[in-house]
């Protein structure tokens, strides 16, 4: 019978493991069930934790691909803010400027923005660019947008280190009560960026123009956010304007990126008014108010994250088919 | 016998777009009704026993790859659950899960992490993986420079070295050179002997019959047949042939009928003939009334080309079967010949001297020729016949 060829009377060392190597110890002898059709946050989170090695490998892969065939590698990431600082320090010296320590002002907001925009742009492509993995390997698909966040975070940390060093040595110095906003602003930034990244990455699988739309939206969004201009100017201009009975400045503050960027500027740049008789630079907001806005946005972002995660999860079951 | 994989009520529906909207504009301009549902799998349930090797077969579009992807966790079923125990490794198509910009070494680590291995665990199997794939000189090259054979070798090497309890394989063995294919099959046999579970999706029905001890046939997303590989393969073959309107699996007046057919090689194997070996086709006849001189014929048909490679008929061989009253046995002796390895099916027929069919069983009996030399076609051998009253 043909079957006898394949049955247990195989002459090859029965019961032996792969060629001379010892058996791998961590055989997960647990029962595993296929994914449920709906997201259950706690078990899914444990599943993601169990796959952290994949996340690490994917982030490493992205960084490697990004800096592959470049001699300096990740130094390029550092060079970006260093050149910024050098150029702006020089330009400001030559031309003079209304904003003292302009490089610090600019970079404290710009680095946060760079994190957001690069996370969104890389995140929106994360599933599509890894089609060969999605179609052939099983792993929680959330890891793909998360790896985009990881890569953006890597650059953010390097660049922030440069900025913090510059603040320390340039004489601008750290300002203590304000600095407490820094960790809070970072937390809001990461949670908010993750939520939006989940959403755009899943949408982009079905509708490829999400990517193009995103680039335009980021451009408009950038100029609606007080990164290169002073927040106080906006506050001053909008103070008397009301739209549909609502104070326009309040509406302006509904932009999540504005709250985040103002938080970073307050924490690191910290100078609201340089001296008596001079115009303010940062908007006139109390520390408590800014902390409150950040906390509120953190809450909203967490809700957004759960919604975006659920939407991503629903769609991710068919990614392998749609790509 | 415990269950390795339990598949319960799995359904998977895909949305088919006549003109799929891939941009928002198209989406907004087109109505929802343009998509229709396609049930790739519908309420599929069966258990796969621990340590068994199951072949999943079916025509194109029957849902077998979708089911494999659901088991592997690549697609999420819309309904039903799949439960399994232990580590599961899947090999789907070429270069599964490799990133072209990473080197072979980095891809091994990436791939192993998908299968749940930590970096340290991967360190321990790394040398064995490379040795098995025979890619020692290429591990620091980017995978995009690999040939398809190299990709398959590396993929298979990782999958078998991560020590999976369950291995899913989809058509990958078709690529790669012959010696690698043989080593894959050896490896699969060793997996079987170690009591691991294998699920194999393939169009190569010979492989299913050779390797598997159970088979499931899917048809339009439903389980159409489940059982031993020979029966299931035959069912599928008949289903595929029945697309041809001239194909009738069994017909005839049954005045005299075929009560049994046995195929035995000179080496004593059933349904298997080694190349260069002779074999015997034994046809048992039965009739309730005396039937005078029916002609017994057979044809050996190649499963891959669907062409007869050897035919014989008692009347043409100058032998008279004589009157069949109750029982008779006809034995065709086929001398040794250089058979090409692969799958064959044997058709057996009985007809009257004036050409009426008493009983014909078309391609009913499987015959396998394992690893062989090359074939000279058609086979220039002359069968001989013996008649025996029972």
Image (cartoon, grey):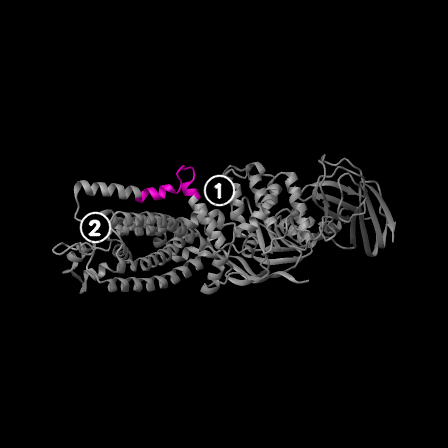
- Residue under pointer 2: A229
Q: Residue at x 77, y 42 (%)?
A: B312
Percent across and percent down for residue B361 are 73, 51
Residue stretch rendered in magenta on the structure: A64-81
Relative depth, front residue between A153 and A277:
A277
Percent across and percent down for residue A38 are 46, 63
Instruction: Determine the chain carrying the residue at label 1.
Output: B
Q: How many marks?
A: 2
The secondary structure that most of the magenta stretch takes on is helix
Q: Is residue B23 visible?
A: no
Question: How far, Cα to Cα, is label 1 from label 2?
Answer: 42 Å
Numbered mark located on residue A200 in the image:
none
Residue B317 within the magenta-colored segment of the rendering: no
Vertical arrangement, residue B142 with respect to residue A301, above or below: above
Vertical arrangement, residue B232 with respect to residue A69, above or below: below
Q: Residue at x 59, y 51 (%)?
A: B162
Percent across and percent down for residue B117 are 55, 52
Vertical arrangement, residue A198 with respect to residue A303, above or below: above
Q: Which SS class for mark 1?
A: loop
- Answer with left or right where residue A243 lies relative to residue B304: left
Q: Residues within 10 Å of mark 1 (few under 14, many from 20)?
A: many
Q: Residue at x 74, y 39 (%)?
A: B339
Relative depth, front residue between B41 and A149:
A149
Percent across and percent down for residue B1 are 68, 62
Q: Residue at x 81, y 52 (%)?
A: B284
Numbered mark located on residue B102 in the image:
1
Instruction: Determine the chain carrying the residue at label 2.
Output: A
């Amino acid at each position: 019978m043909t079957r006898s060829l394949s049955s247990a009377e195989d002459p090859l060392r029965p019961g032996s493991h792969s060629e001379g190597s010892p058996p791998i110890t961590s055989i997960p002898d647990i029962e595993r069930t296929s994914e449920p059709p709906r997201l259950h946050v706690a078990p899914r989170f444990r599943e993601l934790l169990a796959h952290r090695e994949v996340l690490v490998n994917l982030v490493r892969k992205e960084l490697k691909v990004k800096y592959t065939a470049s001699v300096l590698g990740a130094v390029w990431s550092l060079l970006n803010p260093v050149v910024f600082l050098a150029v702006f320090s020089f330009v400001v010296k030559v031309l003079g400027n209304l904003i003292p320590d302009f490089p610090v002002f600019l970079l404290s907001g710009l680095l946060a923005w760079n994190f957001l925009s690069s996370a969104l742009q890389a995140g929106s492509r994360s599933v599509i660019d890894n089609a060969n993995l999605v179609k052939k390997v099983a792993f929680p698909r959330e890891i793909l947008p998360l790896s985009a966040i990881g890569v953006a975070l890597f650059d953010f940390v390097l660049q922030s280190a440069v900025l913090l060093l510059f603040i320390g040595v340039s004489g601008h110095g750290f300002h203590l009560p304000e600095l407490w906003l820094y960790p809070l602003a970072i937390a809001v930034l990461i949670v908010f960026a993750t939520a939006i990244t989940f959403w755009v990455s899943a949408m982009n699988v079905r509708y490829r123009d999400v990517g193009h739309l995103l680039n335009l939206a980021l451009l408009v969004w950038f100029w609606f956010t007080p990164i290169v201009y002073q927040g106080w100017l906006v506050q001053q201009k909008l103070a008397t304007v009301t739209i549909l009975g609502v104070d326009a400045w309040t509406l302006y503050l509904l932009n999540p990126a504005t709250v985040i960027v103002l938080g970073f500027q307050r924490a690191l740049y910290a100078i609201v008014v340089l001296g008596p008789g001079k115009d303010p630079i940062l908007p006139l907001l109390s520390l408590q108010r800014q902390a409150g806005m950040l906390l509120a946005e953190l809450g909203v972002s967490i809700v957004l994250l759960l919604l975006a995660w659920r939407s991503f999860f629903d769609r991710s079951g068919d990614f392998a088919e749609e790509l | 016998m415990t269950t390795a994989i339990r598949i319960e009520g799995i359904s998977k529906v895909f949305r088919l777009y006549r003109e799929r909207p891939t941009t928002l504009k198209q989406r907004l301009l087109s109505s929802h009704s343009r998509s229709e549902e396609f049930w790739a799998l519908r309420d599929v349930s069966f258990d796969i026993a621990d340590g068994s090797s199951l072949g999943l077969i079916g025509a194109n579009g029957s849902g077998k790859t979708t089911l494999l992807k659901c088991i592997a966790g690549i697609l999420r079923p819309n309904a039903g659950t799949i439960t399994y125990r232990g580590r599961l490794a899947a090999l789907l198509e070429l270069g599964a899960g490799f990133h072209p910009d990473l080197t072979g070494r980095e891809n091994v680590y990436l791939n192993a992490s998908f299968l749940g291995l930590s970096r340290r665990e991967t360190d321990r199997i790394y040398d064995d993986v490379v040795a098995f794939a025979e890619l020692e000189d290429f591990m620091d090259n980017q995978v995009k420079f690999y040939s398809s054979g190299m990709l398959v070798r590396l993929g298979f090497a990782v999958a078998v070295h991560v020590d999976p309890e369950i291995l899913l394989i989809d058509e990958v063995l078709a690529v790669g050179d012959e010696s690698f294919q043989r080593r894959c099959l050896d490896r699969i046999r060793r997996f079987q002997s170690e009591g691991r579970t294998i699920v194999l999706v393939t169009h190569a029905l010979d492989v299913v019959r050779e390797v598997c001890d159970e088979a499931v046939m899917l048809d339009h997303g439903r389980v159409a047949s489940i059982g031993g590989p020979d029966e299931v393969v035959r069912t599928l073959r008949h289903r595929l042939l029945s697309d041809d309107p001239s194909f009738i699996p069994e017909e005839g007046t049954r005045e005299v009928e075929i009560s049994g057919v046995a195929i035995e090689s000179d080496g004593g194997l059933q349904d298997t003939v080694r190349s260069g070996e002779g074999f015997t086709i034994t046809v048992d006849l039965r009739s309730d009334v005396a039937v005078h001189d029916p002609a017994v014929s057979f044809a050996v048909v190649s499963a891959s080309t669907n062409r007869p490679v050897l035919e014989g008929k008692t009347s043409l061989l100058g032998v008279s079967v004589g009157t069949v009253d109750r029982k008779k046995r006809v034995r065709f002796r086929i001398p040794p010949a250089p058979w090409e390895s692969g799958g064959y099916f044997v058709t057996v027929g009985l007809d009257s001297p004036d050409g009426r069919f008493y009983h014909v069983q078309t391609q009913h009996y499987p015959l396998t020729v394992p690893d062989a030399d090359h074939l000279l076609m058609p086979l220039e051998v002359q069968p001989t016949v013996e008649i025996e009253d029972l």
